[in-house]
Image (tube, rainbow, N blue to C red):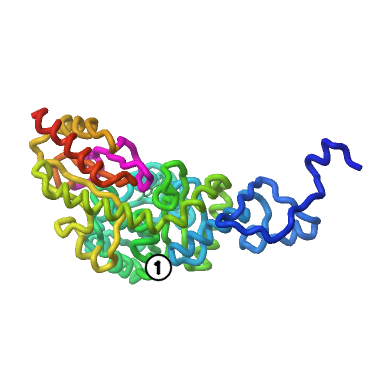
Amino acid sequence: MPSKTTSLIHHPYAPPAGFSAPQPGVHKASTVIFPNTATMRARNWRDKSGYTYGLHGTPTTFTLEQRIATLEGGLHTLLLPSGLAAIALVDMALLKSGDELLIPDNAYGPSKELARNELKRWGISHRFYDAMDPQSLASAMSPATKLVWLEAPGSVTMEFPDLAALVQLAQSRDVLTALDNTWGAGIAFNPFELGVDISMQALTKYASGGGDVLMGSVTTRDEALYARLKLTHMHIGFGVAANDAELVLRSLPTLAVRYAAQDRVGRTLAQWWAQRREVVQVLHPALAASPGHAQWSELSGSAAGLFSVVFDERYSAEQVDAFVDALKVFKIGYSWAGPVSLVVPYDLAAIRSKPAWRGALVRFSMGLEAVDDLIADCEQALAKLSSSR
Ligand SMILES: *Cc1c(COP(=O)(O)O)cnc(C)c1O
């Protein structure tokens, strides 16, 4: 008989099989225990046929990977500790010294900073192109171009590009394409039907939906590409915590209804803003006056609950900040797709090489509050804006 101390660690009781519940169990491991050395040697971390080490996958992370692959319409998914880490994985796995990377000028800002600061040090160059002008991509491509990032719509300014045209251009030169599909979330359209090689998401946004998890995913349909991504993923030691994977698994069943609900509220509010004389432009792909509306309508009928407004130039950045500070239901904070409606003021001149508007821009992301309360909040804060003139 082993001692009580040892029995607390090595206990013979095994629960009966056949447990079934709405959510899968959560498995946590750094160490994975092998029944014998032969099994240990036979197992391979490269495929999902068995378990070798926590970093290389557990039943919990494999389950989440497969669900995200299904959501994206892909074959294989890798999980990363953040959306930005997912972008970094794609860049690091597919590029080497001497290669060139093309990024939309309106891409997620930190993706551009990664290219400017880190990739550059490793001898990987980059160029920014105007995603709204396929000709701009065509002329940016060179024999050194090995990867083209796509994003629809653009971050903050929300221009919706002709994704199919951009993908075709890259394909015609045998250049790989990776789409940041955080906004579409696997709901708005199917990225692989457009022919992209990789779809990446910040699961931090819609897949989590709670404002309490950071996670990213990289999905592909291509076995060889998956093998390359998996190798770099393993070499760098990217992994996600079981509890975080659990939170995302818990949120996935409500993803489609949350997406639709925030879409509805987002459009209602965007249309409300379009009637206001304080703003010169409302940026939401479902609005006819928003850049890329036609491309969006052709590809999809749905949209994330996210839009931006550009204030008339007669309002100073300080006045617009005062409007943002006066909001009560909308909280000031980055990220989106959680339960709390959020707002962020942006300086267009700082984030775009050729800003299309001169006034101050404010981005709104819809939470799950009642739409009337969100409108009333904007209205009372706007009253402060006019009175501060
Ligand atoms: C938030 C976001 C990211 C990065 O995700 P993190 O998990 O915050 O690192 C990448 N792309 C887009 C479009 C995003 O909105």
Q: Nearer the viewer, residue 376 or 155?
A: 376
Q: Is residue 343 magenta?
A: yes
Q: Position of residue 24 (x, y in %)?
A: 59, 55
Residue beneath the point at 48% across and 64% down: 70
Counting from the top left corner in percent of width and height, residue 285 is at 23, 57
Q: Residue at x 58, y 52 (%)?
A: 234
Measured from the top left, where is residue 77 in percent x and y?
A: 51, 59
**In the figure, 219 relative to 193: above or below?**
above
Q: Amino acid at mark 1?
A: Phe
Name the residue at the right extreme.
Answer: 1
Q: Which residue is mark 1?
A: 192
Is any atom of residue 105 visible in this view?
Answer: no
Span highlighted in magenta in the image:
331-354
Residue drawn at point x = 30 percent, y = 46 percent = 366
Question: Which secondary structure lies at badge 1?
Answer: helix
On whether residue 348 falls in the magenta region, the answer is: yes
315 horizontally vs 370: left or right: left
Left or right placement of residue 331 versus residue 269 in this view: right
- Nearer to the camera, 74 or 116: 74
| Residue 98: quadrant of the picture | bottom left
Q: Is mark 1 within 8 Å of ligand 1?
A: no
Q: Residues within 10 Å of mark 1 (few under 14, many from 20)?
A: some
Q: How many marks?
A: 1
Query: Which residue: 10% across, 39% down?
Result: 313
The residue lying toward the viewer, choosing from 215 and 304, is: 304
Residue 62 placement (x, y as % from top left) = 58, 57
